[in-house]
Amino acid sequence: MSTKSDLNLEYVANLARLALTGAEREKFSRQLGDILHYVEKLKQVNVTGVEPMAHASPVCNIWAADTARPGLPVAAALRNAPAQRDHMIVVPKVVE
Amino acid sequence: MADELIFQPAARLAAQLTAGKISSVRLLQAFLSRTMAVDGRVKAFNSHDETGALVQARAADERRAAGRARGPLDGLPVGLKDVIAVEGQPLTCSSKMLANFISPYDATVSVKLKAAGAILWGRMNMDEFAMGSSTENSAFGPTANPWDLSRVPGGSSGGAAAAVAAGELPFALGSDTGGSIRQPAAFCGIVGLKPTYGLVSRYGLAAFASSLDQIGTLTRTVEDAALLLGAIAGHDPQDSTSFRTEIPDYRAELKKRRGTWRLGVPREYFGAGLDPEIGAAVKSAIEFYRQSGCEIKEVSLPLAAEYAVAVYYLIATAEASSNLARYDGVRFGHRSTKAKDTVDLYCQSRAEGFGEEVKRRIILGTHVLSSGYYDAYYMRAQKVRTLIRNEFVCVFRDCDALLSPTTPTAAFRLGEKSADPLAMYLNDIYTISVNLAGLPGVSIPCGFTGTGLPIGLQLIGQPFQEADLLAIAHRYEQGHDWHTKHPALS
Amino acid sequence: MKYEAAIGLEVHVQLRTASKMFTRVAAGYGAAPNTLTDPVVLALPGALPVMNKEALDKIIKAGLMLGCAIEPVCKWDRKNYFYPDSPKNYQISQYDQPICLGGTVEIELPGASRNVMGEHKKIPLTRIHLEEDVGKLNHGTGDSLVDYNRAGTPLMEIVSEPALHSADEAFAFLTSLRTTLVQGGISDCDMEKGQLRCDANISIRPVGETMLGTKVELKNLNSISFVRDGIALEIRRQSAVLEGGGFIGQETRQYDGEAGTSTAMRSKEMAHDYRYFPDPDLMPVKVDAAWQAQIRATVPELPFDRQRRFFEEYQLPYTITSVLVSDRELSDFFEETAKLSGKPQAAGNWITNDLLRELDGAKITLTDCKLRPSHLAGLLQLVEAGVISSTIAREVFAAMFLTGEAAEAIVARQDLKQSTDAGELEKWVAEAIAANPKAVAEFKAGKEQAINAVKGTVMKASKGKANPKLVDEIMRKQLGASPRPVN
């Protein structure tokens, strides 16, 4: 497991698409260091051969038949859009 | 007269509506005026739709008059934590990110409550995106504990708990990811039920940690919890994690299920860190059960007690970092006006729209999933989660339910823990493992501290055995009058 | 130095379903912007995914057709990255437990000429997994507009091993894969509609070298010929770089098919850290033997297998079989006609020539065609029995195509039976000889071809019904000539 210094805040903030202020960086670095230090204790547990638990209940094959239903009217779909034009969402120009 | 109404259990209000002793409109007005009187201090509501609620109340009265009442909930007002979608109503998650968001659709629980005739009118304050244990992490300001306005109501369903405690609502729905219903219920002296994972549909519940989140009830009594749970439980094809199981009449079962229960007491839940006053109150509750003929067994949950908080903060933050990626300022929600390109649009909108605790958890969750750390953090946490669940499975071979404190301390002061996230996280030490194991848990009032703050008793049940769990809780409630005490709010 | 290329393809195929992968709003192409959305597609707070059973059936079928191992358990993972066409900013996909592993795509390389069968190869697949498509960005001058209609469409990703060695092989791979998937009813694979999209990972290495070179990802290969041209260009580009003493950097390039150029993509420069983890909202999928068997029962014969069978069973030539097997319905049409008529070779000729020409002329598909195998079989039998001539047969065919009437009915109603009545034929021939003195004189002078003018007059008089063989005999007898020379 890792130590405090392992948290590359700049890298992670960029992955999470969060602009942090200098003060936030300083504060989070310290607080998350404490938390990461706290979770180090999981190293003490022997997990050899233990299956990871991704769901609270072990069911499978939960699906629906392929029958199309009406969706949202455009007006409802775009009701909360911060910017729209021609029934589409406007974003700054995407450079590919 | 109004006082008599606003502090009555919902089941009794329902009986009076049925008997024609009161009207739904009159009842709603009583809650409205109580809210007008006290919410300036409690600040439990983010918003409420008074006009819409009155229309619904009138419709309920008309149905009742025409002999077409939809059942016990018809015409009863219910509050919803501001994380559950109701078509046409705000859905803010107490975040600046969603300050202006109006949901274009109903959550499954909203559909069910509407069908039962309940009046969905109040949007209850919470910790932003359900991340917190004090309701201080709300973009719209903290809610106060009605028993002591200088203290927190708990969280994240703090607004819902405080409103019920303060007589602003007969009952409400909250959500519980690590104790977010049970802990505020304990702090506010009411009943908080987190059902088994999969019993109540999560469709329309803005996700915090999908494998842990569950909608549950905040009520004045155990019977009210049974009443409200009956209305919202059941399989939903729109939630793949929803479970197919028979839904009993929980309220009727309360009286039928009167076994000599085998109750386990996890020894680790009474160690260091537990406030002696809380410990004493819970022990006397255990004594009550013993004297009423139940078998009390000491059990051991060493892994749950030691590692649940660590496991929880890895799994919950990892899932949250992904669940909250959709709040990006593109299709809805806050959009920064400063952005020059799309990356900037994301970074600025999210920086401006999210509060500090949300950012902290997104960063943590992103880190634990990132390349090179996944196995050490997330994968290991999932494995320890398996071990914690197994521990419960083992204990439940000999027990019908477990008894423990809900929280290590009573309600703390506003601002007391906000500078120390880890201390805040440790406040959920007794509740978190219940979510990790997917079990049902309920907190019921079991006394007061010397300074008059409520104390909660947590009962943990077997998966999908809510009827037993509530019957056990009901037995305690029948022998005590804590639930009839109300904050003065003078 | 001589170089060889190692090419791996990543092919994204939209499955043909009525609704989307994880929600039941309709999936489709060409609808007005943002009319195929719902809370799940838009990733509204609280929305949850539910799997589409049909999409699972279809990918299992694709896997069985391509000889993949269908895994007993597969699960869903979230691939986390921010992009405006991705509503949740994570894509539900399958990371380390895909539904299909292994498998092959049989390809045919170009033959020595058009009517000669080329070399066949089996290209190994790495895996096939299921995921969801993203929305569509429309780039304007100052901004971009997002339409989420496509978002959430079931998308199958087929990944090949880097086992293709030329642009021609890649082209053949895609052609064969498309034919197979279309014939399985898995996808319509219309590249113009984005139903099939292809990215290529291309590296080159000196011949004899076993280590793979640095790979370059080539995107935007959005037509089947762009795949060939784009890959050929990239191989030339990399060879030139190496020849010039440079080295190949790992990068993603965008191919511009119109201009025939490629450029490095800016947005892909940063290394990705997708933070895959199991999606807690979706339960795993277990595929048992019964489910596999149920799907296996719906798997059609593969095109190349069918072609081999057509060679053996019907002794059809390569040119005809390759046309037939490229279209499952056409092959079915052929087989039914062959069975009904007992004349497979004639059926093959009629279908690949006349039927396809008529369909093309009428701009309709085989499904909408009124002429059915029973019609064509009836026609073949009439020709075989000498009831009508092949000239008349063409007329009857055209009539059947238009009306869907049986051949016999058309022949009877229009009185098109070949005439073998000697008296009638004698009379037509005598009249024709009288009417063509010049041709007759030339014929008698030894110009064999001159007789055709006489024959033409007979056919005209008989409205094509005169049996040509009998006409020839009678004509020669009346002109006192010996029977037609056999050459």
Image (tube, coloured by chain):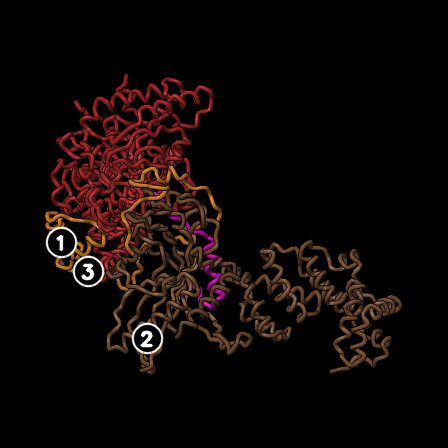
Chain colours: A orange, B red, C brown
Q: Which residue is mark 3?
A: A43
Q: Residues within 10 Å of mark 2 (few under 14, many from 20)?
A: many
Q: Which residue is mark 2?
A: C204
Residue at image coords 32%, 32%: B89
Disc 1 chain ID: A
The answer to whether residue C58 is magenta is yes
Residue B298's place in the image compared with C194, above or below, is above
**Residue at mark 1 shares a chain with residue at mark 2:** no
B364 on left or right of A71: left
Residue at image coords 27%, 74%: C241
* Image location of residue A17, percent across then percent down: 22, 51
The answer to whether residue B306 shows anywhere in this view is no
Q: Which residues are magenta?
A: C45-70
Q: Nearer the viewer, mark 3 or mark 1?
A: 1
The answer to whether residue C277 is magenta is no
C270 on left or right of B396: left
Disc 2 chain ID: C
Quadrant in the rendering for residue B58: top left
* Image location of residue C49, percent across then percent down: 38, 48
C332 on left or right of A62: right
